[in-house]
Amino acid sequence: MGRLSTMLGWARRRPHQFLIAWLALVLLLIFGGASYNLQQERRGIYSRAASTATDYTNTLARRVEASIATAEVLLDFVAAEIERNPASTNDTALAAQLEKTLRNHQELMAVMVVPANGHPAPTTRPAMSPTADFSDREYFNYHRSHTGEELHISPPIISRLTGKAVIPLTRRLNDRHGNFAGVAFVGLTPDYFEQEFKKLDLGKNAATAFTTSDGMMLFRYPTVAGATGRSIGSWDVFKELVQKNDAGVGEYPCPIDGVVRLHAFRHLTRYPIIAFAGIASADLEEEWMASIKLKVPLLLAVLLLLTASGWMMYRQLQRETATKLRLKASLQSADRANQRAHLLNDDLQSAADFQSAVLNSTACGILVTDSEGGLTFINTAASKMLSFTNDEASGKLSPLMFHRTEDVREALQFMRPGDTPYLLMVAHINAHPNREWRFVRRDGSTITVSLLVTPLKTSEGKLKGFVTIFNDLTELIQLQVLKSDFVSVVSHELRTPVTAIRGALSLHQAAVQDSLPPSQQRLLAIASDNCERLIKIVSDILDIDKLGHNKLSLLRTTQSITSLIESAIAQTQPFANLHHVTYRIGLDSEDLCAWVDADRILQVLVNLLSNAAKFSHSNSEVIVSAREEDNVVVLRVADYGVGIAEEFQPQVFDQFSQCSSALTRKSGGTGLGLAITKMLVEAHGGSISFTSKLGLGTTFVVRLPKGAQGHITHRMDKVSAPSIQH
């Protein structure tokens, strides 16, 4: 404020010098601003030209792609017709349809069918002399020597019908035995795209073209002798810019005529074609110079206006007091805004500190990354598990370094151009939600973890990053191993004495059965039944343990499904009689066989039949059926009993899972039967499913692959049978 007062006082004392200083300042501002404005105008002209060239290039790319797509559909149609009916090469209806297609698509010059003899078929449109020979054409020899039926784009040729340039789009024709039967040809006329370009006003020296992806010139306008068919693949700009980007804009000399242009290019989506459009730099400079000529009078007028306003500065100086007051108010307002900003910053810092404290207090490892996979935060638990601090990892590392090399390689095996490695890893992790992963620590050791990766998005839905939450499963796995060992030891220690008790009871029953009173015989029977039940429980626990550790051996042979069903019914018939249930068998064929372990599939059937009898109504029946569907043996066990409650159905195959109904409690059981059944079926490479309605009954469906013939014994962890989906 002191300097401003000094300057105003000086202006009052020396008005003439003030005016001179004012005029010098005006001239500096005018010419400096004009220079900046004109440069901005030039940039705007080039920017609009780049946008125009890009828009036309996109339009050209779409039209070329649509034209080639139309030609490809037409070629496939002709090929299908001829393969279906070789005589259709003389079909007048097909010829009329092709002629109608040509009338509807101006960019297509001709549709031709050239049989293996090289002479055009009568269906060719426009019609051509049957003596014409096209066996010397590049596309004819290409398809004769290549068995593929894909679309082929050849270098431009001169049409023998019109004498004009045409771009051949061709496809191989095969007979019903796959032998070479000729070529289907659609000619793409460059004249159509030339006329479309002439409708635009891109400047007198503008140019357009499209080439193959390796640089062969298919079309260019304005036409330059020798340009069509010429390759620009060795051009540095083409190699460094065009081939490495899907689209772009650049100013460089044209390799055909040497004119410097602002070129735009775009690769077609479906075909190996690149569209170009260029606006001459000389035309843009000419437009800029015309703009300068229009603005010079305006600049002079502004200069005169500012000069004439110099005298008004005195009046402004007289209002100095009012200006000081307004300035003071503005400063006070700015000071209040600054105070509010400091308070807001303190609140944000407090929130950040609270968030950091929450994240660092959890026992789960947490990794936060940006959208590209760069680490931005690692909490205390993750630091301890991985031996990296937040300062060491944040902004410097990627979570990919914590994954094993083989896991990363598995995730990146389908990587395509443009894919981000970390995004592929995230997709791979989320595709296997129940998988256990291995993380590599700083010292090279590994830990087993469970992973959950969640995207972070802004309120507008834009991806901001990812949050990875993981838990160290090492102790849990050790506990599972201890539990399994404990179950195995206890089960084996129980089986030996229980088996001895069963033997003793059997001998005692056989020796004194007739001499004991009925009450003691009933007690012996109860003891024997409970002993058998205890042995079954121990066997189920051992089976679960073996299945859970992939240690159960399968002895697979070709087995009659009928015999297995009859054996299962024979074993469970007393149990069915006890529940007043009858069995009914339904087979498509008595000779139906499967490649299975007979004892284990018999165990599956016994479990399903006993469950069906247990939960059936009195005096009802259980239906057992078998049939072959698509080389798969399908077994069905259906009852008309109480059914399974809908809320319990997801838990049916879980271990120790039982529906809490009065019938279940009355019938007893360990809750392991269906879990073992499912594991045994899947060990054979099959699948098991069920449908049930409460009060109407349940149907279990087992699908088993028929497999190969012969005899083989193998362990479950090496089973390679195909998985049957349902």
Image (cartoon, helix red, strand yellow):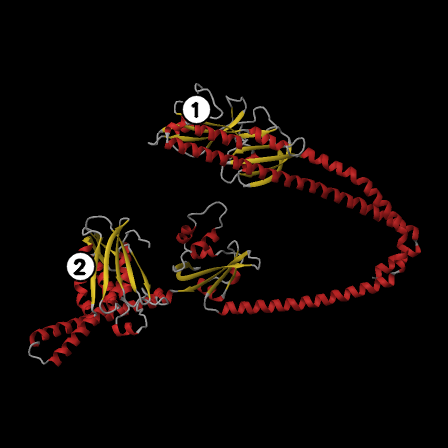
Q: Which residue corresponds to mark 1? A: 122
Question: Residue at horizontal 7%, vertical 75%?
Answer: 511
Under circle 2, the secondary element is: helix
Question: Looking at the picture, does residue 144 appear above or below residue 7?
Answer: above
User: Can you see residue 573?
Assistant: yes
Q: Is residue 104 left or right of residue 610?
A: right
Question: Looking at the picture, does residue 486 appear above or below residue 303?
Answer: below
| Residue 311 location (% of width, % of height) | 90, 52
| Residue 542 location (% of width, % of height) | 24, 66
* Chain-order first, disc 2 or disc 1: 1
| Residue 173 location (% of width, % of height) | 40, 30
Q: Is residue 287 left or right of residue 477?
A: right
- Count residues near mark 1 (Cα–Cα under 10 Å), then give few for <14, some for 14-19, many for 20+: many
Q: Is residue 26 left or right of residue 94?
A: right
Under circle 1, the secondary element is: loop
Q: Label 1 sits on what residue type?
A: Pro
Identify the image quadrant of residue 501.
Answer: bottom left
Q: Is residue 318 left or right of residue 348?
A: right
Question: Residue at horizontal 55%, vertical 33%?
Answer: 210
Contact? badges 2 and 1 (CB < 8 Å): no
Question: Residue at horizontal 79%, vertical 66%?
Answer: 329
User: Can you see residue 233?
Assistant: no
Q: Which residue corresponds to mark 2? A: 566
| Quadrant of the rendering where the N terminus is positioned | bottom right
Question: Looking at the picture, does residue 335 appear above or below residue 63?
Answer: below
CA gap between label 2 and label 1 equals 70 Å
Comparing labels 2 and 1, the label whose residue is closer to the camera: 1
| Residue 369 location (% of width, % of height) | 51, 58
| Quadrant of the rendering where the C terminus is positioned | bottom left
